[in-house]
């Protein structure tokens, strides 16, 4: 994210508390292209899988776009002066920055001009060794602010009891990328899978331990309320990874290790003249995690009631959310054959289970 976009992002950040529900995860990449010649505005065709196909008068350009997943293509400033420069800008929602670098290299600048260009550096062997094949769990977060005087020495916060967000890391040697994906749905009901290349050279810091978002997937995005304990934590994480609906960080993402305790620390500057930190520890399978891993919500054929496998002798609270993130049920003391699913329309739901220790897990549930 560039500094010039920060003012708008910060206004969104401070206004989000006034919104009843807000999506925190917006994982798709959006790049802006200026189409210099009206003849090169594409014909757009909707595909059955939710993507779009773009057809240009130059077949070479059409072929480049066809090699990638394009989710949307729209005018960036539709209400601007039709004779002005802003009217020439279009936004591309996609999932791979290779698309932009390929277009930038192969399409003449008198046809396409891009708002941003991308460069990378090789990922260091130390960073690969630190992350490849590891699962890390988010434990703490903090913010260093020279303006307010707050720093991580006196304002590091533990995640709430029962909050569990784990990220599986790997290394794609063919593309020189660190991959990162949530192990399961987050406490706010989100899931992502991304690829990160080495950081770009911004001439401000060493690059050996830096990353930048490069590829992504649609993921699973759920609406949350600002009062939810998970809200501010996940808002910060997704902004730091460049997959947040409200993005206020900029520059490279730095990844460091605390030599004393082995913690992995993500660090990135933000638009409030401060630095965000998220602190992870290598995940161990806790008793609560193991307990929930054995459970499965399901509906038996011919039985309209919700069942949860391996929930016997467990004191559980249950919440059910629809695809928009709206809570449609909340009950304490779950029992099999008690919640009648025939009153629910078919579709995808999220079921959050929690126990007396406030440990919790979110499950996807498809109602047919």
Image: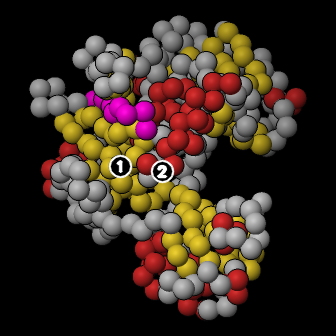
Local SS, label 2: helix
Q: Residue at x 25, y 35 (%)?
A: 264
Q: Left or right: 251 with respect to 57?
A: left
* Numbered label attached to residue 251: 1
The residue nearer to you, when weighing 349 against 188, is 188
Q: Circle 2: is it few (<14), some (14-19), or many (20+) Cα within 10 Å?
A: few
In this orientation, does residue 185 appear?
Answer: no
Place of residue 230 in the rendered image (x, y in percent of width and height, measured from the top left): 52, 24
Q: Left or right: 109 with respect to 335?
A: left
Does 276 lie within the magenta span? yes
Residue under label 2: 4
Task: Write the start and end of the magenta stretch as one range.
Answer: 271-282
Q: Are marks 2 and 1 in contact (CB under 8 Å)?
A: no
Q: Circle 1: is it few (<14), some (14-19), or many (20+) Cα within 10 Å?
A: many
Place of residue 161 in the rendered image (x, y in percent of width and height, measured from the top left): 44, 14
Q: Could you say which quadrant of the image residue 142 lies in?
A: top left
Magenta region, main secondary structure: strand
In this orientation, does residue 33 appear?
Answer: yes
Q: Is residue 297 above or below residue 121?
A: above
The residue nearer to you, when weighing 282 against 309, is 282
Q: Is residue 273 above or below residue 145?
A: below
Place of residue 17 in the rendered image (x, y in percent of width and height, measured from the top left): 63, 24
Place of residue 307 in the rendered image (x, y in percent of width and height, measured from the top left): 69, 26
Q: Left or right: 182 with respect to 30?
A: left
Q: Left or right: 300 with respect to 123?
A: right
């Amino acid at each position: 994210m560039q500094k010039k976009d920060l003012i708008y992002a910060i206004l969104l950040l401070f206004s989000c508390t006034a919104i009843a529900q807000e999506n925190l995860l917006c994982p798709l990449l959006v790049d802006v292209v200026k189409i210099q010649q009206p003849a090169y505005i594409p014909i757009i065709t909707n595909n059955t899988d939710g993507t779009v196909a773009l057809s240009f008068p130059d077949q070479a350009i059409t072929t480049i776009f066809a090699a990638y997943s394009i989710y949307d293509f729209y005018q960036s400033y539709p209400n601007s002066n039709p004779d002005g420069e802003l009217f020439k800008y279009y936004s591309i929602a996609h999932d791979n920055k290779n698309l932009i670098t390929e277009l930038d290299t192969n399409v003449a600048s008198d046809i396409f001009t891009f708002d941003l260009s991308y460069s990378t550096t090789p990922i260091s062997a130390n960073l690969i060794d630190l992350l490849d094949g590891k699962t890390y769990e988010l434990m703490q977060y903090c913010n260093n602010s020279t303006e307010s005087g707050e720093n991580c020495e006196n304002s590091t916060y533990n995640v709430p009891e029962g909050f569990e967000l784990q990220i599986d890391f790997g290394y794609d040697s063919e593309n020189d990328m660190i991959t990162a994906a949530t192990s399961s749905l987050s406490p706010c009901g989100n899931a992502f899978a991304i690829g990160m290349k080495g950081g770009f050279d911004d001439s401000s810091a060493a690059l050996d331990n830096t990353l930048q978002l490069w590829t992504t997937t649609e993921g699973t995005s759920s609406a949350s309320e600002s009062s939810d304990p998970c809200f501010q934590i996940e808002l910060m994480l997704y902004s730091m990874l460049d997959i947040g609906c409200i993005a206020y960080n900029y520059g490279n993402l730095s990844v460091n290790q605390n030599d004393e305790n082995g913690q992995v620390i993500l660090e990135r500057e933000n638009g409030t003249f401060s630095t965000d930190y998220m602190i992870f520890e290598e995940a161990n399978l806790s008793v609560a995690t193991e307990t929930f891993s054995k459970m499965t919500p399901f509906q038996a054929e011919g039985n309209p009631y919700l069942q949860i496998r391996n929930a016997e002798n467990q004191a559980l609270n249950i919440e059910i959310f629809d695809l928009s993130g709206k809570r449609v049920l909340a009950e304490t003391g779950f029992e099999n054959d008690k919640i009648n699913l025939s009153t629910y329309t078919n579709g995808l739901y999220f079921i959050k289970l929690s126990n007396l220790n406030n440990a919790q897990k979110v499950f996807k549930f498809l109602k047919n």
